[in-house]
Image: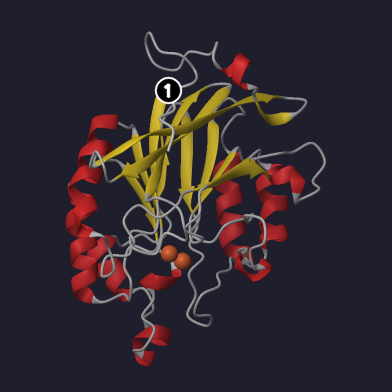
Amino acid sequence: MKKIVHLSDLHFGRIDAGLVEPLVEAVNAAEPALVVVSGDLTQRARSHQFEEARAFLDRLPHPQVVVPGNHDVPLYDVVSRFARPLDKWRRFISEEVEPVHEDDEMVVAGLNTARSLTRKFGRVNEQQVAALRERLCRYPDGVLKVVVTHHPFDLPAGADEREIVGRAEMAMEALAACGADLLLAGHMHVSQTGHTAERYKIHGHSALFVQAGTATSTRGRGEANSFNLIRVRHPHIQVERRLWRPESGTFARGPAETFRHTPEEGWERLPEEVAAGITFDEGGTGLQPHIPS
Ligand SMILES: [Fe+2]
Ligand SMILES: [Fe+2]
């Protein structure tokens, strides 16, 4: 069993500072095999905001797969925005804007969706998708194939359709051809899980998409600050939300959903009574206790 901590939309520069220590504590206590951060590390791509984000990442477990978001591209400095949009990212966060983690159970690939030309919306291009496809296709089906973007491949009900990553259909066709399993994203500041089959009608393929809420931003869109703890034990995945609880000053266990992969159906959500019988942790059950709000 492997655990992935999925954080998103940190927004250093506009954070609730009281959440940083509890978050560092909660992520380290989870002992993940990998930490994923799906973009918007800063509020306005300022150097001091990147420095704070860097210091935060340094306190979390490694390895890490961290991709940029639209807020990590300078907005007002027009020269930087168009000539060197991810300069500060490369200086403070990583030379790599599309990092990859590979081990014996999973391959986790970042895909940069942040662009200079649009303030808010993101997209991918054919070269990026071809490179990703080549990387994922090398692996057999037993290896979990995970793609990390900032802009999502699906949306919560009622959201502006333009928030979906541009050229999503083209990208999904390629990802489906290589059996992508799990798409991790952020940007909406709303937690969500679902199946790609509901939006993308690609025969014989259904990936899971998992959006994380914002871990530390003060703009929570009505949700508590949160992150996702994802447990992977082939052919099962469990997505558990960890929710900020001001009364206890901790990120407490929230609702969990368990999914099973079959060659015929792809990923399907398991009913609670079935999920309860699946063991992820030593001595634990598939459904982690849910602390009601
Ligand atoms: Fe954001
Ligand atoms: Fe964003």
| Residue 269 quadrant | top right
For the question of whether residue 106 can be seen, the reply is: yes
Residue 209 location (% of width, % of height)? 59, 45
Residue 180 vs 84, above or below: the answer is above
Residue 264 vs 153, above or below: the answer is above
Left or right: 195, with 5 as reference point: right
Q: Nearer the viewer, residue 102 or 158?
A: 158
Residue to which mark 1 is pinned: 289
Left or right: 128, with 173 as reference point: left
Q: Secondary structure at mark 1?
A: loop
Residue at position x 40%, y 13% in the image: 284
Residue at position x 45%, y 17% in the image: 280
Three-letter code for the amino acid on which mark 1 is drawn: Pro
Viewport quadrant of the N terminus:
top left
Residue at position x 37%, y 42% in the image: 243
Residue at position x 65%, y 22% in the image: 271
| Residue 156 quadrant | bottom right
Viewport quadrant of the C terminus:
top left
For the question of whether residue 239 can be seen, the reply is: no
